[in-house]
Image (cartoon, grey):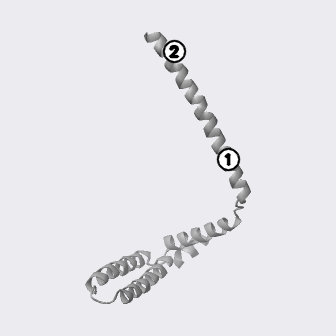
Amino acid sequence: MVAKVEAGEFRLDGLKWLLVVLLVAAGVVGNSYYSDVAVLYRVLGLVVGAVIAVFVAVNTAKGNAFWNLLREAQQEFRRVVWPTRAEVNQTTMIVVAVVLVMSVILWLLDTFLGWLASLIIG
């Protein structure tokens, strides 16, 4: 029953997406057609058109789902516990130390295998 109610909220999604595409196309064509008009007015027109297009897109099923995803991602972003500067420095130093140790080990291994290969080849 809930699915029927949700399906009724988003009617005419195809026409709404067509309107979004037409608004974007009108912005592109209008921007090139009115190229002699000041850039400020063209940018303001494009911003207004973009706001209207986003409003129409959010009122579709997929647009609403994407908007909800963005809101949930923002909430999740607020819950992240970021490391302190000291923790970042400490972790960086550990990574640098491991890279240096591994590079020495690989250099020694390469030298040994090269020496072994030269003994076998002659």
Task: Classify mark 1: helix, strand or loop.
Answer: helix
Residue 71, percent from left and from top: 61, 71
Image point (53%, 69%), residue name: 66
Residue 55, percent from left and from top: 49, 81
Task: Classify mark 2: helix, strand or loop.
Answer: helix
Residue 112, percent from left and from top: 55, 20
Q: Quadrant of the N terminus?
A: bottom right
Foreground residue among 21 and 113 = 113
Foreground residue among 28 and 12 = 28
Q: Quadrant of the C terminus?
A: top left
Marks 2 and 1 in Cβ contact (< 8 Å): no
Kind of residue at disc 2: Leu
Report crowding for label 1: few under 14, some 14 to 19, many 20 or more residues within 10 A (C-alpha). few
Q: Does residue 55 appear in the picture of this structure? A: yes
Q: Does residue 1 appear in the picture of this structure? A: no
Q: Where is mark 2, residue-wise?
A: 116
Classify residue 64 as left or right of residue 43: right
Mark nearer the N terminus (2 vs 1): 1
Q: Where is mark 1, residue-wise?
A: 93
Q: Is residue 119 above or below residue 85?
A: above
Classify residue 59 as left or right of residue 43: right
Question: For residue 109, what is the image quadrant?
Answer: top right
Image point (30%, 90%), residue name: 37
Question: For residue 23, what is the image quadrant?
Answer: bottom left
